[in-house]
Amino acid sequence: MSRQSLTRENTFFIRTFGCQMNRHDSEHIAGVLASAGYSPAESADDADILIFNTCCVRQSAEDRVWGNLASLASPDRRPRVVAVTGCMAERHRVAVMERASAVDLVFGMDSLERLPSLLEASLDGALCDLGEVENAAIDRLPASREGGARAWVPVSHGCDNRCAYCVVPSVRGRQRSRAPEDIVSEVARLSADGVLEVVLLGQNVNSYGRDLPAPAGFAGLLEKVASVDGIRRVKFETSHPRDLSRDILEVMASVPQACEYLHLPVQSGSDRVLEAMNRGYSRDYYIEEAARARSMVPGLTLTTDVIVGFPGETDEDFAATLELVRRVAFDAAYIFLYSPRVGTTAAALADEVPQQVKHRRYEQLAGAQDAQTERSLGAMVSTVQEVLLEGPAKRGGMLRSRTRGNRVVLLPGSTPAGPILDVLITGAGRHALRGVVADGKVEAS
Ligand code: SAM
Ligand code: SF4
């Protein structure tokens, strides 16, 4: 006999792990469930339907999800339906349910349109539906956006690169670019709804369009999006150093809506390691690209990702990374301990770096970058920055906003609603700035 059906009184809660792309996918999950009549719960404990949108880029991200799922094993803590989606669903498929008995449904993003009926069907027995990666229709589905005047807009899904350490291509499939006209119409709709800033998302935005029937380039797309009526700021992530062409930097330099923000992951400063990672550029090439970006785009905020402890990374290789990070003087960097991922070419490499060596290198690199981040933030004190208000900060009754360079600026809770304001930067913390509205000047939207 089937259990009692789900009704419109049932609520849902989504726990999202991982990158901005996942956070945006969660906006679509929420949109589909809201359209089916379900409402969001205040917390996971109050929800009838609990959805985990997962990440498997590093083992630590997976471990957090397994831990969360294990804590749901006791019957008195269980919501009516527990569902898992995202990268772990694509990677482990039905095995998610074998390992975590609390899970009723594993679904892929390409099955999202069917989510309401899948949830219902899962009441009669655990289900796995991963859909077809090739026909992603997710961008056409409703979205409950979290960003107020800022919105994420994917330009492509999947990735055609084969970085030796990375599991993304095997779980997200090959690059599938969206048609430029679909992206532009979505941005126009967002603008009509009051969005002022769009963040274009893709694993490698610079290779956007190569897979389209009429190949299109990212620079052209950036210009088109920037010219949509009402759009004041356009940012994008992530850029691949090998594919960052001059015309993209020219658009950033010449189109006022294109923000002075570039996230350009370097991953390593050693030629030997870059080659083993299959990144397709050398250390010198990267340094030149970074310098060119800084000289062409005045006021650029340049950020990066670095992996420490890639198999075979010697003290010399690490010293080259440290030197590059110091030399380029990134405004911020995300530093990761290498995490072996089954199925990637790096996972088969011998010569793993001992855990304590990885940690020591991590600390050293993070220390050098923290000092640089502090200098970069400190240099902004007493300047006036244009920020976009995002909403309440996590702590202290403050409001959170972002500069054109994507720096977080905390403002007093009493700051009048912007959404775009000029603020005077009054202080710098380790990762964020503090500010107040400059001269009481508030720009209307
Ligand atoms: N496509 C983007 C790129 O090329 O940079 C982002 C990919 S990934 C989701 C984000 C970051 O995670 C990467 O830039 C890399 O530094 C890190 N990463 C990916 N695989 C990793 C692994 N196996 N171990 C540690 N860090 C990893
Ligand atoms: Fe992974 Fe490399 Fe693709 Fe980024 S560019 S998603 S690191 S394979």
Image (cartoon, rainbow, N blue to C red):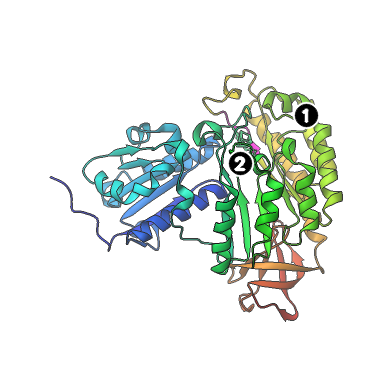
Is the CB atom of the residue marked by disc 2 within 8 angstroms of ligand 1's nearest atom? yes
Q: Against 182, is 320 above or below? A: above
Q: Is residue 234 visible?
A: yes
Q: Report x, y in % for residue 245.
A: 76, 41
Q: Which residues are magenta?
A: 336-340
Q: Is residue 131 magenta?
A: no
Name the residue at 33% across, 32% down: 98
- In the rendered image of this protein, does residue 3 appear above or below residue 411? above
Image position of 224 (left or right of 376): left
Give the residue pinned by disc 1. 270
User: In the rendering, at what x and y percent does residue 176 appear?
Assistant: 55, 39
* Lower sequence index among marks 1 and 2: 2
Residue 203 is labelled as 2
Query: Can you tell me whether the CB of the residue at mark 1 lies under 8 Å from the nearest atom of ligand 1?
Result: no
Q: Residue at x 58, y 19 (%)?
A: 348
Say which amino acid is labelled 2: Gln
Percent position of residue 188, x then y = 58, 62
